Amino acid sequence: MCAGNLVLDILVHPVSGIRWDTTTWVESIRQSLGGNGGNTSYALARLGTFVRLTGMVGRDSFADFVLAQLEQAGVETSAISRCAEPTATTVGLVNPEGARTFLHQPGASKVAFEIPIEFNSGLIAGCSHFHLANIYGLPHMRVHAEETLRRARRAGLTTSLDTGWDFRGEWLRVAAPCLPHLDFLFANEEEARLLTGREDHAEAAAHLRSLGASTVVVKLGSRGCALYSAKQALTIPGYAVHAVDSTGAGDCFAGGFLDAWLDGASHEDAARFANANGALSVQSLGAVTGLLSRQETVDWMRRQSL
């Protein structure tokens, strides 16, 4: 089961810079599924893991597009609600190297999760794990995340959290209460630094583990990832690919890791599979456009090692 924001992404590529009072021609302006909850759930479903997503969209055509994309991938969407606010929307400007900047309208995300999630038998039917995608992108979840994760554990689910970017700069004040209730914490290198004040990601992970997180996975972009638990500290190199768009790659990484781990993979193998999922994501415009099925991803990984 996944909880998170659902977003309609409008991606513009390539954009080398912005000059006001002019017209800039670009190669592509494309609508795509977005949002940490949407991307991660799509990745899990595309890989073959059953996933139920809960979140909020509007009553507009953007919501219709987002829901259709999720359902086409196999995401179970009955726990997604609609509201009078517009569906959250992001305009992403992507430069020729694949880096991006976002203009974001939170819309429905502002009213989602007004109370902690109640993990009743209907909501968690068929689920063994709960993933919270980006507490910072959901204003109410900043308040309710700890209780939500506590309830998930009480319902017998294992848990994970992908921090996301904190535009308010509250970082550890929001995240710290969640850490004792987590089996996995995902954060990229910059997020780990801002959460802890530690420049070295190993030191940042050690601090986060001291606050209660069981296993910390630090996403290192093209360099792969690092994993820290009570039993091991691993650095797993990434794949050398041409990055077109890094939007949502971290969400796809988390989806890949959870898919492999829930299927019985070791932490190391799950991290390697997650790296592959992230690498496939960045090669296409849009977070989930380049994702493959589980077997296709395994075949792609084999080809990279030849």
Image (tube, rainbow, N blue to C red):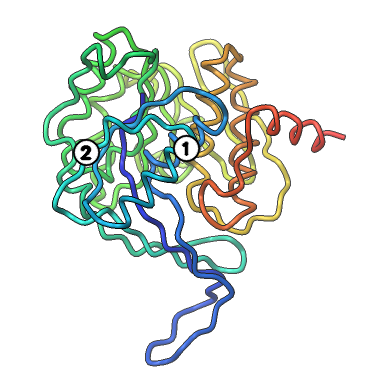
Q: What residue is at 36 percent from the left and 29 percent from the top? A: 161
Q: Position of residue 287 (x, y in %)?
A: 51, 49
Q: Position of residue 276 (x, y in %)?
A: 65, 36
Q: Is residue 183 above or below residue 137?
A: above
| Residue behind mark 1 | 42
Numbered label attached to residue 245:
none
Residue type, label 2: Ser
What quarter of the picture does the C terminus occupy?
top right
Q: What residue is at 34 percent from the left and 33 percent from the top? A: 77
Q: Nearer the viewer, residue 152 or 68?
A: 68
Q: Residue furthest right?
A: 306
What quarter of the picture does the N terminus occupy?
top left
Q: What residue is at 70 percent from the left and 33 percent from the top? A: 296
Q: Is residue 110 left or right of residue 298?
A: left
Closer to viewer: mark 1 or mark 2: 2
Q: Is residue 199 left or right of residue 84?
A: right
Residue type, label 1: Tyr
Q: Secondary structure at mark 2?
A: strand
| Residue behind mark 2 | 81
Q: Is residue 261 left or right of residue 134?
A: right
Q: Position of residue 230 (x, y in %)?
A: 49, 12
Q: What residue is at 16 percent from the left and 30 percent from the top? A: 144
Mark 1 or mark 2: name the one nearer the start of the chain. Answer: 1
Q: Secondary structure at mark 1?
A: helix
The reply to whether callout 1 and callout 2 are in contact (CB within 8 Å) is no
Q: Residues within 10 Å of mark 2 (few under 14, many from 20)?
A: some
Q: Position of residue 136 (x, y in %)?
A: 27, 43
Q: Nearer the viewer, residue 103 or 76?
A: 76
- Quarter of image, res 297: top right
